[in-house]
Amino acid sequence: MPNYHIWTIGCQMNKADSEQISSYLEQIGYRPCPKPEEAEIIVLNSCVVRQSAEDRVNNKINALKSLKRGKILALTGCIVDSRVDGLRDRFPHVDLFFAPQAFSELSQFLEDRGLAPKGLDSGLITHRPKPSAFVNIIQGCNNFCSYCIVPYRRGRERSRPMAEVVREVEVLVSSGVTEVTLLGQNVDSFGHDLQAKPSLADLLTELNRINGLARIRFLTSHPKDMNSHLIERMARLEKVCEHLSLPIQAGDNDILQAMRRGYTVEQYVGLIQRIRQSIPHIALSTDVIVGFPGESEGQFRKTYDLLGDLRFDTVHVACYSPRQGTIAARKLNDDVSAAEKVRRREMVEGLQECIATEINGKLLGQIVEVLVEGREKGKWCGRTRTDKLVFFVDEAVHTGQFVNVKIEKTSPWSLQGIIAGQSK
Ligand code: SF4
């Protein structure tokens, strides 16, 4: 059997796209392999959201030049936009460039070379080795936050028809999936561009009815688009997990305005309060950018203090890096030094480590329900409804089972425990 190798960096949307590509390649008879040198087809799924990610992609493509002989090399992800000619000039050893979600270009390329049967639906996943799956529901973004390259690379928002999403989830459930994570750069915008204008709340309600599906998650939400109707529906629908990703990005109103985020600190705090009132045990995660152009020490301190007040379960913190073509890169001076950005990032990381230690420490001795996702370093691992990573040892457990685990050890990043019985 021929092999394929897929390399993915970036957000969950890229991971979801890679799963779909893997599914297609396996349907046409290819087998996954960990080493590119042993593969006949190599797919690189790129991210350019930060300069460091783009550098990794460039290095990866160049590193494959020497072992390319006889192999098909395909490049997808956010590096591929309408300017493919420029990419062709830079990377002549790449055989195929296809935009995110343009799976048909890959299948057409392989069909034209007699490597795939004609007419297979490369957009529909029929095989999943895992109990949880990502499902894209909306592509692109209309927001144009001043630092973000996504709207330029992934284009404007395009929702998938609701019936198509529901059908895909039904197919996944029939193949053994019990947990889905709905993905979009801005999931709360789902449906506004469809004729019947369904909302994310409507989609959650439809999915909640599917027999065999146990858990529903969605990410990423936007604070300016998250409304009371959605919060109320989250609280009411039993399959929707108590877990939400809601990026704040900064704790100072002038910086938020320069970022073009569309909300104030006060509005964000009010939103968090409403969410916690409606869903008391919800786990919240957020994203923060430090060292945005013009961010003073005092403005950074406001972000730092706010994170201390709001106490998120998880904080993803990144140093600002200008992305060519964005509003911030064109109009603002990247005036916070690299060393200072790193200092601010490390301060946030240190604070969050303390907060997560305390939050997770409260789970010591408690019994949590875990969906077993697989094995890692000799232990079973899985996640709670609140997205906590849990490890345990047991002989009789299998991937895909729901088990109750009594927590015996906690850390800021994960929990460890022993089996306290099967849950479902
Ligand atoms: S909401 Fe802002 S940060 Fe998120 S993808 Fe859209 S433009 Fe980028």
Image (cartoon, grey):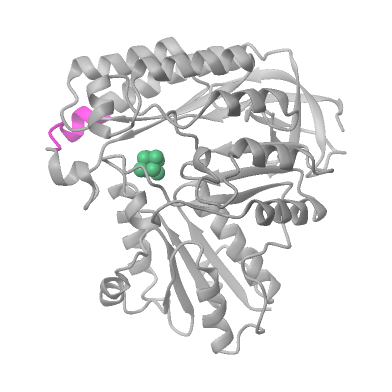
State left or right for residue 173 relative to residue 323.
Answer: right
Location of residue 238 (image quadrant): top right
Residue 377 position in % (x across, y down): 65, 41
Q: Is residue 183 above or below residue 352?
A: below
Q: Which residues are magenta?
A: 334-342
User: Would you say residue 31 is visible in this rendering?
Assistant: no
Q: Position of residue 146 (x, y in %)?
A: 26, 40
Whether residue 275 is visible to the viewer of this picture, yes or no, is yes
Q: In which quarter of the view is residue 110 placed?
A: bottom right
111 vs 384: above or below: below
* Magenta span contains residue 340: yes
Q: Residue at x 31, y 39 (%)?
A: 145
Instruction: Using residue 84 as the reference point, say whether residue 332 is left or right of it.
Output: left
- What is the x, y in percent for residue 2? 64, 78
- Please name the residue shown 63% across and 11% down the image: 362
**Residue ID at (23%, 18%):** 299
Quadrant of picture, ligand 1: top left
Q: Is residue 63 left or right of residue 194?
A: left
Q: Nearer the viewer, residue 214 or 94?
A: 214
Q: Locate the N terminus by quadrant.
A: bottom right
Q: What residue is shown at x 44% (from left), y 20% (from top)?
A: 352
How far across and how far down the image is residue 59, in percent? 32, 61
Was residue 242 drawn as part of the magenta stretch in this picture?
A: no
> Which residue is more in the foreground, 273 or 111?
273
Total residue callouts: 0
Location of residue 217 with respect to 30 vertically, above or below = above
Choose between 345 and 303: the one closer to the eye: 303
Q: Is residue 155 left or right of residue 331?
A: right
* Image quadrant containing the C terminus: top right
